[in-house]
Image (cartoon, grey):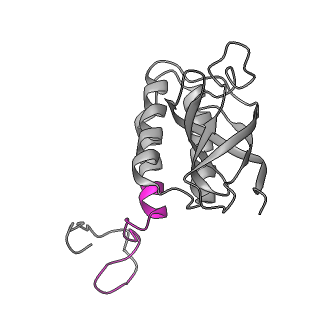
Amino acid sequence: MAAKRVSDEPAFVLHSYDWSESSLILEVFTRHRGRVALAARGAKKPTSNFRPVLLPLQPLRLTYTLGAEGNAEIHTLKGAEWAGGHVMPMGEALLSGMYLNELLLRLLARDDPYAALFDVYGGVVRVLAGTQGEALEPVLRAFELVLLRELGLLPNLGEETMTLSALSAGKRYMLVPEGG
C-alpha cells in the first residue's frame, strides 16, 4: 500500500528536536490532524529550503506523507511554506507564545484534531505578534479556558452544576473544584 500524502495542511511548529546530524523531528499542530510528529530530513543543512521556514509561532502550509500503514508515530515532511501574515513575536510575547506551545505539547494527544482550537491558537499568535507586552495575561487566560473547554475539562460556567439552571446576573456564585 502506498503512503498517503497530506498536502497544503495549515500548521504551526510547536517544538523541534535534533534527530541526526542533518535532520529534525518536529512536533506540529495542524488544523485537520491535530498534533503530529514529522521527520524533516536535511532540515539542518545550510542549503535546506526547510531551514528558514520551520520556525515556531509562524503560520505554515505543510505537505507530508503518512506511514505505509497510516499509523506510524512519525511521518515524513515533504514540503513547507510560510503562509504569510505576521512577524515573529518578541520579548514577553515570544515567551507567552512558547508557553502556549508547551501547553499544547503536554495536553494534546497526537492525531486528535481540534480545528476550533487551531483557529483560536492562530488568532492568539497573531495578537501576540502585534503586542509589546500589554494585555498578554487576558489573552493567555482566554486561550487556557478555550483549551480546557476543548479538552472537556472545563465545566459549563453559564449554569449551576447541581440544578443545571442558568446563572443570574445579580447573584454570587462559587466554583467548587470537586463538584463544579
Q: How many marks?
A: 0
Which one is nearer the viewer's eye here, 140 or 14?
14
The answer to whether 122 appears left or right of 160 in the picture is right
| Highlighted range, magenta | 145-165
Q: Is residue 166 above or below residue 176?
A: below
The answer to whether 25 appears left or right of 6 in the picture is left
Kindly identify the residue that appears in the image at 62 percent across and 42 percent down. 122
* Residue 70 on the magenta segment: no
Which one is nearer the viewer's eye here, 14 or 78?
78
* Residue 161 on the magenta segment: yes
Q: Position of residue 178 (x, y in %)?
A: 19, 71
Q: Is residue 115 above or below residue 141?
A: below
The answer to whether 100 appears left or right of 56 in the picture is left
Q: Main secondary structure of the magenta part?
A: loop
Q: Position of residue 85 (x, y in %)?
A: 73, 31
Q: Position of residue 40 (x, y in %)?
A: 64, 34
Q: Is residue 57 above or below residue 121?
A: above
Residue lying at the far top in this picture: please name it.
46
Residue 24: image quadrant is top right
Kindly identify the residue that appears in the image at 61 percent across and 27 percent down. 55
Q: Is residue 6 above or below residue 139?
A: below
Which one is nearer the viewer's eye here, 132 or 87?
87
The answer to whether 15 appears left or right of 158 in the picture is right
Which one is nearer the viewer's eye here, 3 or 85?
3
Kindly identify the residue that appears in the image at 54 percent across and 25 percent down. 131
Kindly identify the residue that appears in the image at 45 percent across and 63 percent down. 151
Q: Position of residue 173 (x, y in %)?
A: 26, 68
Quarter of the image that includes the N terminus: bottom right
